[in-house]
Amino acid sequence: MNSINQLINDIKGGKISPIYFLMGEESYYIDLLSDYIESNVLLEEEKGFNQVVLYGKEVSIQDIISNAKRYPMMAERQVVIVKEAQNLIKTIDQLVDYVKNPQPSTVLVINYKYKTLDKRKALYKLLSKSGVIFDSKKIYEDKVPSWIQNFLKSKQITIIPKAALMLSEFLGNDLSKIANELNKLEIIVGSDKQVTPEIIEENIGISKDFNNFELQKAIGNLDHKKAYQIVNYFAQNHKQHPFVLTISILYMYFTKLMTLHTVSDKSPAAVSKALGVNPYFVSEYITVSKNFPMKRISGVLETLRVYDSKSKGVGANLGPRDLYYELIYNILK
């Protein structure tokens, strides 16, 4: 599958496909590539006559083909961009005939967000031969902190690992939403060029002391008082701190601790790679693993499964405070 950087570098180098079919759950990269083509394939003076943007809600496949078959005016090529093409899901296969013989002087860009083509069908197979298919997949949540660090690094900005975790917990794995917040932070940090937990707290409204990262740390260190303080805050602000998110984050945390017990090489580099965590946190995981041997972790994982079910009304009807308190009690008992 083509990577976003590879595709952009190809376009920069003049290797331009007649069709780009951009599909998948993660809209960020679809928008990024589509916007890059819209801004860079044609010169500014060529765009007036040779660049058109269509919307799937407003056009048919035949409208798209008709535009794609036009010849450019006073330019080497034209660009036809179809946004919201997922609205054409019932008729998208009608592109087959055009894809068999695309207009070489047209760059047709199809933005097919939140959907994917059936790989068994003719359209996918033909596009694979005569065009470019880009499948933009959702990033796994545990990869988001690294994505945040790399995004800011490209802007010569560093971020404290804890701050990256705070952001990923609060914003989830919607890259468009994350990028929007990071662009705001770029303006805020200015010449300091570093994002800290304090900056996150002051400007995005995420508490640096009462969040799931601090909760897992308190649990790992067997700090009962701190753990109950945090979940009490969560219970009072349960809309901003949904129980299901806490369960998910703790499950990933204890799964990593379980993995740590199976790693023979306890060097920071080896542990970081095995757990998929920033080397900054390796020593913390090693310390916590002494408090949670494998047998105890197995019990914690079962407790998390039980309370995930209880939060959905299975076998209990507990409010947020009782759910959190019982969960912490059963993990730390």
Image (spheres, helix red, strand yellow):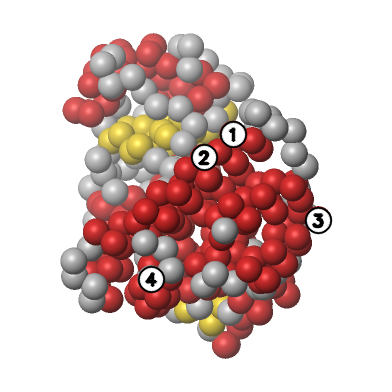
Instruction: Give whichever of 19, 115 is nearer the camera.
Output: 115
- The earlier-in-sequence mark between 2 and 4 is 4
* Mark 1 and mark 3: Cα distance apart in space: 21 Å
Q: Quadrant of residue 180?
A: bottom right
| Vertical order, 207 against 11 (above or below) | below
Q: Which mark is residue 290?
A: 4
Say which quadrant the C terminus sits in.
bottom right
* Mark 1 and mark 4: Cα distance apart in space: 29 Å
Q: Name the secondary structure under disc 4.
A: loop
Q: Residues within 10 Å of mark 3 (few under 14, many from 20)?
A: few
Q: Name the secondary structure under disc 1.
A: helix
Report the residue that reaches farthest toward the front: 333
Mark 2 — residue? 305
Q: Which mark is residue 309?
A: 1
* Residue name at image x 76 percent, y 50 percent: 321
The answer to whether one can see residue 1 in this image is yes
